[in-house]
Amino acid sequence: MKAKIGIKETDLVKVTAILNNLLADENIVYQKTRNAHWNVEGPDFHAAHLFLETQYTELAEIIDEVAERVRMLGHYAVGSYAKYLQLTHLKESQYEKTDSNGFYKELLSDHESIAMNIRGNLAAVEKAGDQATEDFLIGILEQHEKMAWMLRAHFA
């Protein structure tokens, strides 16, 4: 059953496409963060392992919220890695070593890229008249800015 929430179906299609693209990005950065958590080595192993666990836990919550937002709008959330790889603007992990700085640099780039992508989509969501999704995306944007800051702090 389609959602009757005061937004035209054509606009809901546009907004849910933006959200499904974000869902793909979130899943890719989540998996890259899990990979870093599993494979990090070095003298800072324990701290890096715990830090990365904090980040992937937060990403898991974001993933669930984005998928649920798509469903609230009466559409289906994508749910396969094949589809995520088609929709994401991120690259699969390019880092082959196991030290924390290499992982952190790649993840930092991804979080900053997601933040820029969200910012770039806010006008389209606003034009669709979906203030709730606009507000939702601003909250997600803030979370990625914070995760990027946490990663960036390792290089100070």
Image (cartoon, grey):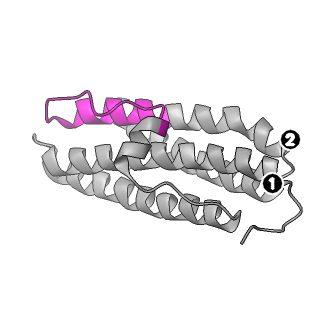
Q: Nearer the viewer, mark 1 or mark 2?
A: 1
Residue beneath disc 1: 9
**Residue at 47% across, 64% down:** 61
In the figure, is residue 14 to the left or right of 35?
Answer: right
Q: Quadrant of residue 99?
A: top left
Q: Give x and y (percent) for residue 115.
A: 57, 37
- Kind of residue at badge 2: Lys
Asked if residue 94 lies left or right of residue 61, the reply is: left
Question: Callout 1: helix, strand or loop?
Answer: helix
In magenta segment, residue 97: yes
Query: Is residue 152 among what the camera can see?
Result: no
**Quadrant of the rendering where the N terminus is positioned:** bottom right
Q: CA distance from mark 1 to mark 2?
A: 13 Å
Report the residue marked by disc 2. 127
Q: Residue at x 17, y 51 (%)?
A: 38
- Residue farthest toward the left in the current orientation of the protein: 42
Quadrant for the C terminus, please.
top left
Residues drawn in magenta:
87-112
| Camera-side residue of 3 and 130 | 3
Residue sitting nearer the eye, 26 or 41: 26
Among the two numbered marks 1 and 2 on one chain, the one whose residue lies closer to the N terminus: 1
Residue 24 magenta-highlighted: no
Relative to 111, say whether 56 is above or below: below
Type of residue at label 1? Glu
Disc 2, SS: helix
Crowdedness near tag 1: few (<14), some (14–19) or many (≥20) residues, C-alpha within 10 Å:
some
The quadrant holding residue 17 is: top right
The reply to whether dot 1 and dot 2 touch (C-beta < 8 Å) is no
